[in-house]
Amino acid sequence: MGLLNGKTAIITGAARGIGKAIALRYAAEGANIAFTDLLIDENAKKTEAEIAAFGVKVKGYASNAANFEETANVVAEIVKEFGRVDILVNNAGITKDGLMMRMSEAQWDAVINVNLKSAFNFIHACLPVMMRQKSGSIINMSSVVGVHGNAGQANYSASKAGMIGLAKSIAQEVGSRGIRANAIAPGFIITDMTAALSDEVKAEWAKKIPLRRGGTPEDIADVATFLASDMSSYVSGQVIQVDGGMNM
Ligand code: NAI
């Protein structure tokens, strides 16, 4: 018996990284998985096959999470195919770092649209389904820098702080309909996103982590499984930092 047997999850940006780890963990717990990414290429097809190996239903959908109309269409397709949406993980995200003085409007808009507007798009499309079901768990992928801020990441930090405000507001709006919303704020997690950082920056981060290691996508997937499952049925409007005890 899995923790998520019979549930259907939508996970955005899950062809790789943290989203993929969450998809695999959910599948191991018995959930059917609809995941999205910009492209369903060879790598995404491989992800799909790895998920299918758990014996659950799975389909990867090509969709730009930042696009409102595309999101409405893809959620409609998913509902037609899977019949329900029990779990929504707003995971798709990008960075376009730079100091404010040098940040372009395009850098700001891209990060806000992919990281924050995408969550609005998906919550907007999924809520009517969850309202009908009178249940649902929404998980927004925030970041420790959404809680503390970070020099050189004003756009990213603002988008991730927005993910917290969004989750807390949705928790208040639709809690009476049995729908929960929470945010996860990962610290330094080893994925393609952080691989791009210099060794000096990585060493600086490591000094701030009492557990003395970077996190793994699986560390985040564990908490995402708790928040998706009935084990957290009285947890809503919360931000859970998964950061090895990091002191920012
Ligand atoms: P990643 O870069 O490895 O994976 C992100 C995925 O999102 C990719 O598959 C990418 O193609 C997809 N994506 C990008 N734009 C998209 C769009 N417009 N529509 C649909 N999919 C799109 O990143 P990672 O590290 O797995 O991050 C996942 C989430 O966790 C992001 O929201 C990130 O901001 C957040 N996070 C990551 C941390 C880290 O240390 N890696 C720390 C804190 C938060």
Image (spheres, helix red, strand yellow):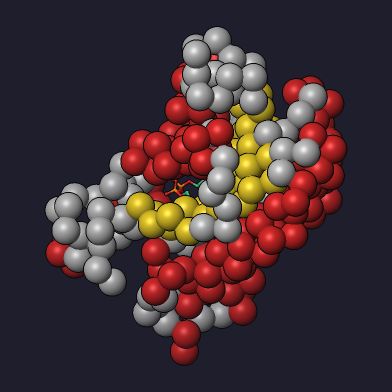
Q: Give the camera-side residue of 191 and 234.
A: 234
State left or right for residue 124 relative to residue 38.
Answer: right
Quarter of the figure with residue 25: top left
State left or right for residue 131 relative to residue 224.
Answer: right
Give residue 122's position: percent from left, percent from top: 72, 49
Residue 163 visible at all: no
Q: Give the camera-side residue of 46 and 53.
A: 53
Quarter of the figure with residue 198: bottom left
Task: Reply above or below: 172 against 135.
Answer: below
Give residue 178's position: percent from left, percent from top: 71, 44
Task: Reply above or below: 7 against 105.
Answer: above
State left or right for residue 233 relative to residue 224.
Answer: right
State left or right for residue 137 relative to residue 204.
Answer: right
Task: Reply above or below: 57 against 9.
Answer: above
Residue 223 visible at all: yes
Task: Reply above or below: 34 against 245.
Answer: above
Q: Give the camera-side residue of 10 and 67.
A: 10
Q: Give the camera-side residue of 172 and 97.
A: 172
User: Looking at the image, which residue sits at the far bottom?
Assistant: 101
Q: Residue at x 54, y 33 (%)?
A: 229
Give residue 244's position: percent from left, percent from top: 25, 53
Q: Residue at x 43, y 55 (%)?
A: 240
Q: Residue at x 48, y 59 (%)?
A: 239
